[in-house]
Amino acid sequence: MRTSCRRGPAGRTVALGAALALLLAGCGGQPAVTSTAPTAAATAPAAVELAADLDDLAEEVPGELGVVLLDPEGGEVVSRNAARPFTSASLYKLFVAHAVLDGVDRGAIALSDVTPGLGLTVEQALGAMISWSDNAAGAALGGWLSWEEVESFAHGHGFAATTFDPGTGSADVVAMTTTPADVAAFLDRLRRGELLTGPSTALLLRLLEDQQLDYALSEGFSPDVGFAHKTGLLEDVSHDAGLVEHGGREHVLAVLTDGWSGYEDSRPWFEDAGREFDAYVHADASASPLAPPLARAAP
């Protein structure tokens, strides 16, 4: 149930540092949905309550709230503004990692190769980009492949609303966008082994599990909830998206927000949102105690 109380950090390590100075990106798009609703297949009391709580939470977001929550089988539990483009912030790094690791799978790139202009191996650069959200690593890997190729690659894999155009805009505002639907679909297909080979899938999942920036939804999660995720943060944009695991059941969650006056303003909101999703996954696990975990592709 939605409450108005706030609480302090939940004891998780918050490793912000210089990594919070993320690549700036431009806004775009328009809201497609103005309320959150469970799908016809997800009308359990917990899903209905979550949808109502998210409607309340949306009123506290200065701009727009975009959400997609998928169940362990990939079915939609709730969604809001799923197709609305948001400035991607560092969520773009998920799609860059996909393109790089596809090159590894095809033999065009080796994890031991040195990333041009960075002095790190490809594997080290991927770790810095995903687990630490390092901007230099993201820029080097994306520029190495070329942003046009990264965008074409993303579109060719069905992520048509995700764009990369760093040459557009003012000196530090570029056009990189994505949607909650694209991010959720990416994570769902990643966990199923549909995007990459087994070893590359395992590597990217491990880097998400090793996420060092736990300042958003994680602050509202209980210690028994696992979260392999990627954050995205700008002055007016704050996102968090990943795989939420509890009781042997894994959900895909993408939460995108904008309109903030400063990135610190979003942190209490994300803690509240994290508690609502935490309550849902606990209720879901209790209702489905015998459900098997999602099968992974073999490494």
Image (cartoon, rainbow, N blue to C red):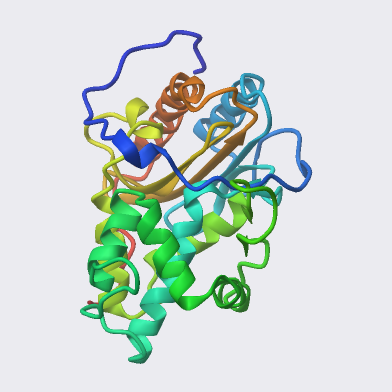
At x 47%, y 77%, the residue is 145
Whether residue 274 is situated above or below residue 98 in the rendered picture = above
Extreme residue in the bottom direction: 107
Is the residue 153 above or below the residue 12 in the image? below
Q: Is residue 275 left or right of residue 52?
A: left
Q: Residue at x 30, y 66 (%)?
A: 118
Location of residue 171 in the rendering, given as x and y in whole percent from the top left corner: 62, 48
**Residue drawn where x is 76% and y is 40% of the image:** 33
Q: Is residue 279 left or right of residue 9?
A: right
Give the total of numbered labels: 0
Relative image position of residue 179 (x, y in whole percent): 63, 52
| One can see residue 194 in this view | no
Image quarter of residue 157: bottom right
The image shows residue 104, relative to residue 32, as above or below, that is: below
In front: 296, or 238?
238
Locate the C terminus by quadrant: bottom left
Query: Could you tell me if residue 192 is visible in this image?
Result: yes
Is 182 displayed left or right of 269 in the figure? right
Q: Residue lying at the far top in this picture: please name it.
A: 5
Q: Nearer the viewer, residue 54 or 137?
A: 137
Q: Where residue 224 sits in the image (x, y, percent)?
A: 22, 35
Residue 101 in percent (x, y) is at: 36, 76
Q: Of 276 and 120, which appears nearest the observer? A: 120
Snapshot quadrant of residue 77: top right
Residue at left offset 40%, top offset 39%: 284
Is 222 located above or below residue 200 in the figure?
Answer: above
